[in-house]
Image (spheres, helix red, strand yellow):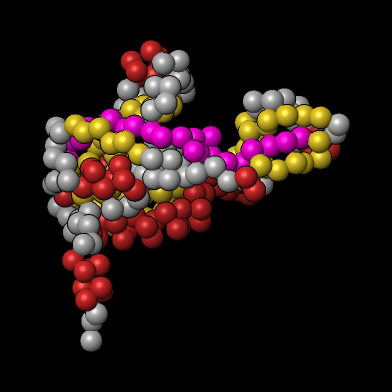
Amino acid sequence: MVSEKTKEKTEKKVKKRMVSVNFTGKELLNGEVFDTTNEVVAKEHDIYDPKRKFKPLTIIVGEKEMLPLVEKEIEGMKEGEERVVKLSAKNGFGERQTDLVRILPAKVFAEQKINPVPGLVINVGNTMGKVQSVSGGRVRVDFNHLLAGRELEYKVKIEKEFKTKKDVATELFDKYYSMIPGTKKEIKEENLYITVPSNFAKNLEEVNKSVIDLAKAFGIKVTFKEEKAKEETKKEEKANKEEKK
């Protein structure tokens, strides 16, 4: 027998939607903008990075791609709607934890050829930290999120909702494969055919599984095909020619 709590959770299950969102996040205390999809805003607040593409972010609502309360707000928004979401530290990047401030020997940094100076953001064991102080061969590093303990505000706007299977299939491909050289797509009705270079195939196995499941939620079937990369084909052709000599 299904319990009332289980029923409630099932009823509250969010229907997946694909939307493109523009957002700007700032700290409430000092009004400092820490992230944005808007190039003009990024330049105004001195966080512009020429290597980054400033454009609306395509997200799948229900996949936890943004902070939980921000995504919850987006769930109830329509295309073209804009809202402001205020977050406590707890609902943002969490409260600060004193046990995440650690003392490390300076030799750890010397081995990695890193000069630890106060304010430097480093990666230790796949965890980001910020150097607070350096003294007597010891380095004090704060591994709390850089925005931990801060109250935040997000301004979000749904620029577009992708509703047709063709649009969703196109965005799925662009979101997960457009940065991989040599990938190609073909869309036929509710079918998305993705060709991936054979030299990337192994590394993409887990991504492919996720994309198949996501696509299924939108009524799209994804089929993958491997294709030898041009460089790989050229090497084989060269090897064959040398064998024939």
> Where, by quadrant of the figure, is residue 38 drawn?
top left
Residue 234: x percent and y percent?
A: 53, 40
Examine the residues drawn in magenta and state their main secondary structure: strand
Residue 241: x percent and y percent?
A: 58, 44
Q: Nearer the viewer, residue 194 or 79?
A: 79
Left or right of 7 in this view: 230: right
- Tell me the residue at 26%/56% (across/down): 215
- Tell me the residue at 26%/48% (across/down): 72
Residues shaded magenta: 139-161
Left or right of 60 in this view: 129: right
Image quarter where the C terminus lies is top right
Residue 6: x percent and y percent?
A: 26, 74
- Tell me the residue at 34%/48% (across/down): 68
The answer to whether residue 245 is visible is no
Figure check: 176 above or below 82: below
Left or right of 103 in this view: 171: left
- Tell me the residue at 20%/57% (across/down): 15
